[in-house]
Image: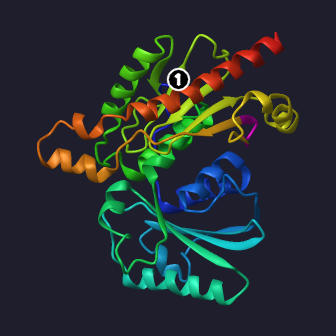
Amino acid sequence: MPTDPVRFESVTARDVSLIVLEELTCSAAFRSWLLEASGLEGETEPTTVLEARDSLGGTETVKFDADRKRAAIEAGLEIADERVLLVLTIDTALEADADADALESIRTRRDRALDGEWDDCQTVAVAPAAALETGTTGAESPMDATISLESLRDRFAARDTERGAFRASLLAAAIGDRGRTSDAPTIVDDYRAHLAEREPSVDLEAADASAQTDSATVAIDGPSLADDHRLLHSLREGTIELRIPGAAAHLQPFAARYATVLPPTTNFLTDGETLVLRLSVPSLASDSSEADSAADSGDDGRGSLEVDPSAVDEALSAVRDLLDLSARIAERGS
């Protein structure tokens, strides 16, 4: 990734919403990740985008974005023969804002969707992690799920492309880089130590050295990884991806050729021109409440943040499978 990314002086929620809207409609890999994070089975069920739009004024009224800190996206999806309306509210404020009118607007939108042509309606709050920790999750909240802006930033940064760096910088500006300090460095250290014992030839590096969030993604390197391939492990989300640039157009023949050497749970996706092979593994990261408790007690977090060795074993098995595949592909292309 470039060492001098673009710097932004001012980013609004609408800027973020337009990027999310483009990714949702154009990138199968991003769409799969977003639907899973939203509580929808995006990875295991075929998904068709029926319609999508950004809502400059939010879900009901232009007042929703009066301070330029809120925006909304609505996407009509068909998932396993069900018509689902996904409503994403995007907020760049660092503190939770219990706006009764905005929350009621979301409830009204859900009711109208279910009374109309949609079988289900999923509402998701997208905001800085600090805001999500203090709001939108109470019993009175109309939100079904939450996604942190930091996790979006890390996902773009992990692409290791100029375009990904641009988007990661924009997201960083949207949250002002003032989010909570995460447990990611400790988790990465523990993960690296376990790998050093089990597979010394494998090494880790931060997918984005500037990213310090609760959704750490690390790049994995090994002697059998092809020069132009990228192997990424999202520690909290529990996914490992082999990214092969320029191979998206060959998804079907690729899947047929290598299906017998990969676990049956492998997901074949595309992200622009990149072919993405994704395996799900146990999450290595503890939840934020454990990290907060450790910090409040004065503990350095090592005890509560240590990774489970059995989870590392499963992750390493997936890493080996994808490294072997990378070597096969490189050998076939030579």
Confirm whether the magenta stretch covers residue 226: no
Residue 9: in sight, yes or no? no
Residue 307 position in % (x across, y down)? 36, 34
Q: Quadrant of the C terminus?
A: top right
Residue 182 position in % (x across, y down)? 31, 42
Residue flagged by tag 1: what amino acid is it?
Ile
The residue labelled by disc 1 is 220
Q: Which residue is drawn at 54% across and 39% down?
A: 281
Residue 223 location, quadrant: top right
Q: Residue furthest front?
A: 310
Task: Give the dominant element type of the magenta stretch: helix, strand or loop.
Answer: strand
Is 194 left or right of 36, judged from the image as shown? left
Q: Which residue is drawn at 31% across and 51% down?
A: 288
Residue 325 location, quadrant: top right
The magenta segment: 269-275
Q: Quadrant of the N terminus?
A: top right
Q: Which residue lies furthest to the right in this view?
A: 253
Badge 1 marks a residue whose secondary structure is strand
Q: Residue at x 49, y 33 (%)?
A: 5
Is 111 left or right of 136, judged from the image as shown? right
| Front position in the image: 284 or 274 | 284
Residue 296 position in % (x across, y down)? 14, 49
Residue 242 position in % (x across, y down)? 65, 30
Q: Which residue lies furthest to the left in this view?
A: 298
Mark 1 crowd level (few <14, some 14–19, many ≥20, 10 Å Cα): many
